[in-house]
Amino acid sequence: MSDWKKLAMTWATSTLVGFYTVFVLMQFWNWFAVPLLHVPEASYWLIFGLNMLFGLMTGVGEQENPAHERRWNALFIILNACVPEHKMEDVKEEVRSETESIWSDIGIMIFSRVLSRSLTLGLGFVVHLLV
């Protein structure tokens, strides 16, 4: 599978996880904040907007400073010059195998987010029943 397809699938899956996260937040608001604060229940899209608002305020999802990327690139150019020619192919192969495993790491990260949100939702539901 090409990297573009992997990137598209990762983006789509991450977007779905984001929508699921909003659902979990909405349930928690409606289960706990409504009776505690005596406020009306919140709709999905209201919680979605609040999630975006807090994301903007906290800087979640913002890109890193491009200067850091350039420094790393410069460092790797220098390191590349330090590798003897007879070992260059071995080093390139090791780097290639390391970078190809990023997709499985991203998949595990997304799965762990879904799992943690689901466990949180389940535990919250149990607490909701006890309240």
Image (spheres, grey):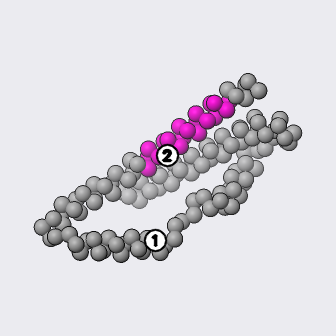
In the drawing, does residue 24 fall left or right of residue 112?
A: right
Q: Position of residue 83 (x, y in %)?
A: 20, 69
Who comes first in sequence, dot 1 or dot 2? 1
Residue 6 placement (x, y as % from top left): 41, 54
- The residue type indicated by label 2 comes to Ile
Q: Residue at x 18, y 60 (%)?
A: 90
Label 2 SS = helix
Q: Does residue 126 lie above or below 79 as drawn? A: above
The residue to which callout 2 is attached is 110
Q: Is residue 7 magenta?
A: no
Q: Which image quadrant is residue 36 in?
A: top right
Tell me if residue 2 can be seen: yes
Q: Residue at x 37, y 72 (%)?
A: 73
Could you say which quadrant of the image residue 96 lies in?
bottom left
Q: CA gap, disc 1 to disc 2?
A: 25 Å
Give the residues drawn in magenta, as a range.
106-125
Q: How many marks?
A: 2
Name the outermost residue toward the left. 86
- Outermost residue on the right side: it is 38
* Crowding near the residue tagged with mark 1, few <14, some 14–19, many ≥20 C-alpha atoms within 10 Å: few
Q: Give the residue displayed 32% in from the left and 70% down from the top.
A: 76
Q: Is residue 43 above or below residue 120?
A: below
- Type of the residue with mark 1: His
Residue position marked by numbered label 1 in the rendering: 68
Instruction: Kindly report the secondary structure that dominates the magenta region of the rendered protein.
Output: helix
**Residue drawn at 69 percent across, 56 percent down:** 54
Callout in the foreground (1, 2)? 1
